[in-house]
Amino acid sequence: MPQPSYRLQLAVHCASFFGEHEEAHTVDYYAPGTLSWIGVLEAETEDPFTVFARRYRAALAALPLATRDAKLGDGLDAHLREEWGHFLSGTYGLCTRTGLPEDIAAKELAICVIKELTADAQRAPDLQRLRQAVDLLDRASTPFAPHERARSSRHRYVDAVRIRYGLAAA
C-alpha cells in the first residue's frame, strides 16, 4: 500500500472561559485513488507490483502520444520498478490527481514528450503535439500545495510551457 503523501502535525491551542487547552494531532493524507487501489488488491490474485505494472503498461498503450525516451521503451521494466518505489512512498499522491498507475503513466509520458519537443531551443516544436502533451499532464497532475507549486512539475511543464509557447489551457 502507498504511504501517505502528506503527514500533517497539528498543534491546537484554545482559550475560553474554562481556561486554556492544548492538544496535538497527526493527520495523514492519502491519494484519492487509495481506496480504489485497496479494492483492486482485494479482488486480485496477482502480486501488487504485477497489477501496478499491467495497469501502467495498459495506460501507456492507450494514450495518444509516443516518446522516444528509452525509459518508456526498452527500459520500461527498470522504470516500472523505480515508479513502484515512488508509488509506495506516496510521491504520486501529491503530484497526480488519483495516485493510480494510469495517472502516473500519463504524467511520465507527457513529461517525456514535452522535454523532447522543447529540448532544441533553435527549432520550433510541433505545437499541436506539444499542446496535447501539456493538456495530458494538466489532466493527470494535481494543482499542488501552494508552498510546493513553484518547484512542481506542473509549474515547469504546464504553466511555464503554456506561457512560453502561447498555449491556452484546454
Image (spheres, grey):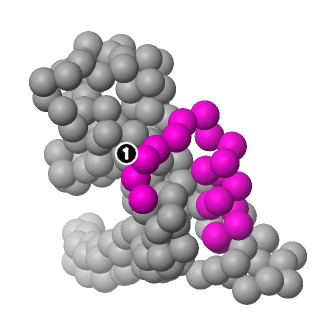
Q: Which residue is mark 1?
A: 111
Query: What residue is shown at x 64% (from left), y 70% (from top)?
Result: 53
> Quadrant of the image for the N terminus?
bottom right
Query: What residue is shown at x 54% (from left), y 54% (from top)?
Result: 105
Q: Quadrant of residue 77?
A: bottom right
| Location of residue 50 with respect to 136 vertically, above or below | below
The residue at the far left in this view is: 122
From the viewer's perspective, is 14 left or right of 95? left
Residue 47, percent from left and from top: 73, 86
Query: What residue is shown at x 21% (from left), y 37% (from top)?
Result: 119
From the viewer's perspective, is 9 left or right of 88? left
Residue 28 appears in view: no
Q: Residues within 10 Å of mark 1 (few under 14, many from 20)?
A: many
Main SS category, magenta section? helix
Residue 149, percent from left and from top: 23, 46
Q: Nearer the viewer, residue 110 or 99?
A: 110
Q: Is residue 12 magenta?
A: no
Residue 63 appears in view: yes
> What is the span of residues highlighted in magenta in the rendered image?
52-70
Q: Nearer the viewer, residue 137 or 1?
A: 137
From the viewer's perspective, is 24 left or right of 105? left
Q: Is residue 63 magenta?
A: yes
| Location of residue 168 with respect to 23 vertically, above or below | above
Residue 155, percent from left and from top: 24, 40
